[in-house]
Image (cartoon, rainbow, N blue to C red):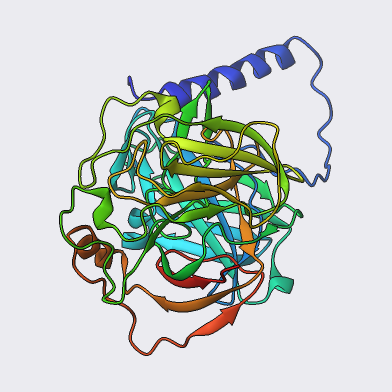
């Protein structure tokens, strides 16, 4: 049976052990106790890309956003039936059915959700464990993965089984508390945590390792009085009233990298032929301390007012909002990361010291009209409120203080 490689390997190991025992006197059987779980064949193996960091968000809850990678070691298909995040016996989150399919993507096939892993295939599962009370956050998370096997190998691998994989520790570090990188009304967060946005799904294989630099990255656009981002010719950056807006340093700290001279892209057109280093367009990287690096991207060419080595103060104007690099409409891309490389690093959460939460877009589907010059739909009856020491969620619309 060509598909029984796993079984043959296990049987071979058992045979070796039995042969060794046969050449010596068989010891008297004894009874022992152990806290180590018995060995079991596990067709799916897993790991967490990075231990999660808790962050309070504008929904009044604390989020643990992270990624689980699962690999099918079998020479046959397996189907994921559920994935649970566990704190001991307590279930923190369970994904199953269409919900699991929504949050799962095969490696190299990011556009389509799936729960089926072919022979040797790997998949990412994006997780968002939420606590209403931060006092109830776990310190450790295990993951129970239930699967069905298309060609089981009983008794070693039954048709249905549940494995516990990928232990993770919840980090005790606190998100950096910073000031907003922009000023003014109606700045919309159109691409960030914690839904299946392009930023959350951006897992970059660089220098032989997988990185999630954009885990908490925000793309900012500004809505006008009619909830649009442009009027007139879509292909002209001048049609976007917020083009050229001042970008502010979010904290004190030294500039460690600057790139300028990249041209503006044509709005409405997806750029092609960019080198890896050009994806952020004109950008600034700032060391704000405690292992946090701020990344300001897609800046207007020639507008950068800083150079490497400059010591910045929070609120200082450092550049203007542009449309350079991998950008199809003027916007500011902003994120924090654990190293100075904008791509070869892991994204870190952050909180803003204060801002006003004005509204929220209805859904990610409401972003499409914006790109056609139409108004975005906002949630009706939204309660405007002041916020402090929390992080925005995707679709939030905010006012940031000026001066």
Q: Quadrant of the C terminus?
A: bottom right
Compared across the picture, whether 241 is left or right of 89 comes to left
Foreground of the two, 230 or 138: 230
Q: List x then y, in percent, for residue 327.
A: 33, 42
- Quarter occupied by residue 103: bottom left
Q: List x then y, in percent, for residue 26.
A: 79, 21
Foreground of the two, 383 or 193: 383
Q: List x then y, in percent, for residue 140.
A: 71, 55
Q: List x then y, in percent, for residue 16.
A: 63, 14
Asked whether residue 154 appears in the rendered view, the answer is yes
Compared across the picture, whether 27 is left or right of 354 comes to right
Foreground of the two, 313 or 294: 313
- Quarter occupied by residue 92: bottom right
Asked whether residue 163 appears in the rendered view, the answer is no
Compared across the picture, whether 11 is left or right of 282 comes to right
Q: How many marks?
A: 0
Residue in the picture at 71% in, 51% down: 313
- Quarter occupied by residue 15: top right
Foreground of the two, 200 or 273: 273
Q: Residue furthest top?
A: 23
Residue in the picture at 52% in, 65% down: 183
In the rendered image, the vertical position of residue 391 relative to residue 249, given as above or below: below
Q: Quadrant of the N terminus?
A: top left
In the rendered image, the vertical position of residue 366 relative to residue 324, given as above or below: below
């Amino acid at each position: 049976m060509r598909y029984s490689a796993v079984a043959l390997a296990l049987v071979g190991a058992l045979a070796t052990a039995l042969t060794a025992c046969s050449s010596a006197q068989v010891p008297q059987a004894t009874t022992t106790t152990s806290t180590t779980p018995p060995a079991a064949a596990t067709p799916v193996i897993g790991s967490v890309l990075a231990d999660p960091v808790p962050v309070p968000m504008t929904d009044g809850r604390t989020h643990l956003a992270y990624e689980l990678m699962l690999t099918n070691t079998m020479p046959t298909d397996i189907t994921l039936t559920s994935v649970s995040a566990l704190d001991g016996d307590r279930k923190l989150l369970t994904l199953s059915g269409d919900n699991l399919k929504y949050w799962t993507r095969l490696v190299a096939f990011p556009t389509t959700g799936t729960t089926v892993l072919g022979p040797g295939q790997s998949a990412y599962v994006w997780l968002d464990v939420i606590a209403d009370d931060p006092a109830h956050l776990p310190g450790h998370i295990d993951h129970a993965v239930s699967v069905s096997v298309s060609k089981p190998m009983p008794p070693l691998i039954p048709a249905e089984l549940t494995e516990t994989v990928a232990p993770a520790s919840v980090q005790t570090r606190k998100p950096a508390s910073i000031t907003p990188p922009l000023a003014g009304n109606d700045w919309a967060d159109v691409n960030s945590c914690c839904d299946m946005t392009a930023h959350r799904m951006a897992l970059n294989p660089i220098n032989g390792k997988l990185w999630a630099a954009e885990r908490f990255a925000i793309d900012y656009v500004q809505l006008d009085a009619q909830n649009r981002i442009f009027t007139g010719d879509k292909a002209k950056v001048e049609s976007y009233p917020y083009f050229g807006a001042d970008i502010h340093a979010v904290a004190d700290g030294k500039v460690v990298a600057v790139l300028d001279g990249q041209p503006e892209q044509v709005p409405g057109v997806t750029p092609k032929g960019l080198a890896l280093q050009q994806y952020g367009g004109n950008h600034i990287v700032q060391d704000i301390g405690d292992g946090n690096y701020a990344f300001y991207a897609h800046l207007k060419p020639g507008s950068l007012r800083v150079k490497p080595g400059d010591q910045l103060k929070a609120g200082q104007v450092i550049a203007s909002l542009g449309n350079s690099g991998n950008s199809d409409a003027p916007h500011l891309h902003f994120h924090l990361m654990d190293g100075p490389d904008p791509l070869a690093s892991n994204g870190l959460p952050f909180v803003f010291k204060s801002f006003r939460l004005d509204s929220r877009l209805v859904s990610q589907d409401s972003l499409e009209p914006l790109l056609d010059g139409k108004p975005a739909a906002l949630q009706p009856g939204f309660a405007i409120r002041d916020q402090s020491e929390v992080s925005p969620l995707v679709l939030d619309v905010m006012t940031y203080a000026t001066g």
